[in-house]
Image (cartoon, rainbow, N blue to C red):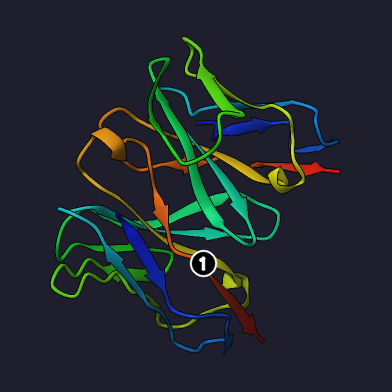
Amino acid sequence: KAGVTQTPRYLIKTRGQQVTLSCSPISGHRSVSWYQQTPGQGLQFLFEYFSETQRNKGNFPGRFSGRQFSNSRSEMNVSTLELGDSALYLCASSFPGDDTQYFGPGTRLTVL
Amino acid sequence: GDSVTQMEGPVTLSEEAFLTINCTYTATGYPSLFWYVQYPGEGLQLLLKATKADDKGSNKGFEATYRKETTSFHLEKGSVQVSDSAVYFCALIPNAGGTSYGKLTFGQGTILTVHP
């Protein structure tokens, strides 16, 4: 069974731009969670989607948003990029009724 | 709120040494507990999990036991290899729904380096 995939793997943007990251969960998984990983703050939860509904949200500004499609694929969007948004963005998926999350390889975003 | 505390790192060991990475947590109720491993340039891989008190998770020679009385989930391996060099994260997720949906809370990570 294929694992969680994320595209693109690397992105370079400039301040003020916006970016969209994509995540395809493991087949049959319906929950997708997103995390930001930085050296200073570690791993921080962004939001979680299940059946196209956001069920939970972390403590990030409204510039960070996401959505989920009917095939469970998910996207996250960051608008008006800031230097501090440079990070590894990880998505994870889980099967209904199972709280075990399986992670993708991440998207490395660099904001210049 | 929920929190996870891992032992200070980094940890440097010789091959075949015994490994312990301490992890303690604060959470309401009975969370599920996890250890994840991250190799350079990669995402997180699930190493093992435990869902209730006294459960022992194990995988690839690594073990951890869910200790409710001490709120701990220490990771151990009897004989480490150079290939075990990576960053290890302890994490929890509450079994409470609501604001805990899909939200893993992670420790700060412990860098392990194993020398031949």
- Please indicate, yes or no, whether residue B101 appears anywhere in the rendered image: yes
Q: Residue at x 74, y 34 (%)?
A: A81
At which x and y percent is residue A39?
A: 64, 61
At which x and y percent is residue A75?
A: 59, 23
Quadrant into which the C terminus of chain B falls: bottom right
Specify whether A96 is left or right of B42. Answer: left
* Vertical relation: A74 (above or below) A105: above
At which x and y percent is residue A55?
A: 35, 26
Q: Residue at x 39, y 48 (%)?
A: B104
Q: Residue at x 24, y 57 (%)?
A: B27
* Vertical relation: B18 (above or below) B72: below
Considering the numbered disc 1 on the image, is that residue within a helix, a strand or a loop? loop
At which x and y percent is residue B24?
A: 31, 71
Specify whether B68 is left or right of B33. Answer: left
Say which chain tag 1 marks: B
- Residue labelled with disc 1: B109
- Please indicate, yes or no, whether residue A98 appears anywhere in the rendered image: no
Quarter residue A89 falls in: top right
Q: Residue furthest top?
A: A70
Quarter residue B71 falls in: bottom left
* Vertical relation: A14 (above or below) B115: above
Between A23 and B2, the one nearer to me in the picture? B2
Q: Residue at x 50, y 49 (%)?
A: A44
* Vertical relation: A95 (above or below) B25: above
Quadrant into which the N terminus of chain B falls: bottom left
Amino acid type, mark 1: Gly
Q: Residues within 10 Å of mark 1 (few under 14, many from 20)?
A: many
Specify whether A46 is left or right of A97. Answer: right
